[in-house]
Image (tube, helix red, strand yellow):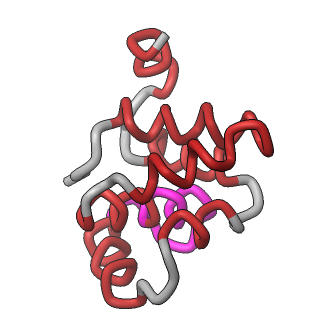
Amino acid sequence: MLEISPRKVVHVIFQAREGRLAQAELAEFIEGLNVDEKANLVALAWVGREAFEAEDFEEAVATAMREASTPTSEYLMGMPHLAENLEYGLEQMGISVSDVEEDFL
């Protein structure tokens, strides 16, 4: 079960798409998340880049918690295609990004 609101994930997606203009804000936002939200965000990115299947999401979350060795913002912001990975990860989890984007805007 997803332990981060899709709205927060969409916020990260939007800021990641802004690139350098929003880097400081994105890092601050990610570091402001609680431990569970950070692990879920990393797991979603992994599902989105197909390192894990959606049905293995709980395993991905556990792995993210166990292997966290750098600040989550640094790890995620260093990931190529972060926005796309998160968007695809949400879709794989059965969450419509379009619906969340409408609510977000």
Image x and y of residue 15, in percent: 62, 36
Query: Which region of the structure is painted magenta?
Result: 43-55
- Residue at image coords 56%, 73%: 51
Q: Is residue 96 magenta?
A: no
Residue 57 visible in the shown view: yes
Q: How many marks?
A: 0
Tell me if 37 is positioned left or right of 103 in this view: left
> In the shown orientation, is residue 57 left or right of residue 22?
left
Residue at position x 33%, y 89% in the image: 66
Percent of width and height locating residue 49: 63, 62
Q: Nearer the viewer, residue 26 or 80?
A: 26
Magenta stretch: dominant SS? Answer: helix
Q: Quadrant of residue 87?
A: top right
Q: Is residue 35 above or below residue 6?
A: below
Figure quadrant of the N terminus: bottom left
Image position of 55 with respect to 5: above or below: below
Name the spot of residue 33 as percent of width and height, x first: 32, 54
Residue 50 vertical position relative to residue 16 in the rendered view, above or below: below
